[in-house]
Amino acid sequence: MRFCKIIALGLLLVVGTAAHSELYKGIGPLDSLADIKARFPKAEFKELHPAWAKITEFLYEVTGLGMSGTIVIKLDDSTVYLTQLRDAADTDEKRKFWQDLIDKPDEAKTVGWVRWIPDAPIPLQRFIAKYGPADVKDFAEEDMQPYRSWKRGIQAFLTDDEKFVTRVDFTYTNTETRNAYKQKYGFVPDFLKNSR
């Protein structure tokens, strides 16, 4: 019986950790721009306008004294989705909740992904020591920059000699996004219910 409990605990740890990605500075899925500004109250936020951004996508560069490097955060404007939730709400209290989020633009912008650009390149070996061997070794399509990727939502872009990391992208698993919806809004949207 004791052996079965040990096996079950081991499986729980493996399954539990497989569903979680690495969060940078605690920035998680569905964190709003307002949440991030509260987390970094003395940081400088600069809105960027990349050519690929749609009207509902925002990119912010976050810098400040005491911060290591630069954080770039991609946010999605959830106003259209929040409006649908407001219109489908079955009580005045729920309608007011969704409307309050719509009325605060920084609350309606939620995190899609996070990028960290360190002040100086970091040896790739440090990432391998922390996360193990990369799950994917490849080159970026847009500029052929080499990268390593781990299933836990980390993609490290490398120098040409593939020895140093110049930037790191952090993404979220669907499990984390589902959990964030449950925690923040009390439900999981249909598009996430059956996704991996």
Image (cartoon, rainbow, N blue to C red):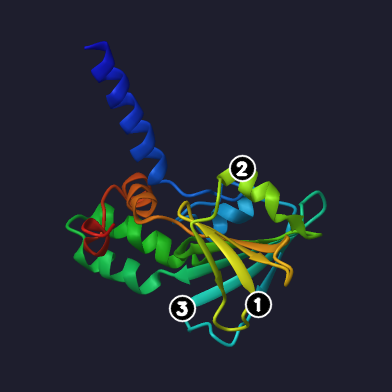
**How far from the left and from the top, in percent, is residue 11?**
31, 32
- The residue pinned by badge 2 equals 130
**Dot 3: few (<14), some (14–19), or many (≥20) neighbours within 10 Å?**
few
**How far from the left and from the top, in percent, is residue 172?**
45, 56
Residue at 58% from the left image edge and 88% from the top image edge:
51
**Dot 1: few (<14), some (14–19), or many (≥20) neighbours within 10 Å?**
some
Q: In which quadrant is the N terminus drawn?
A: top left
Q: Pick whichever of labels 1 and 2 is earlier in the sequence.
A: 1
- The residue pinned by badge 1 equals 48
Q: Pick whichever of labels 1 and 3 is earlier in the sequence.
A: 1
- The residue pinned by badge 3 equals 56
Residue type beneath disc 3: Thr
Question: Outermost residue, bottom direction?
Answer: 51
User: What is the CA distance from the residue labelled 1 to the residue labelled 3?
Assistant: 13 Å
Residue 58 versus residue 193 in the image, above or below: below
User: What is the CA distance from the residue labelled 1 to the residue labelled 2?
Assistant: 31 Å
Residue type beneath disc 1: Leu
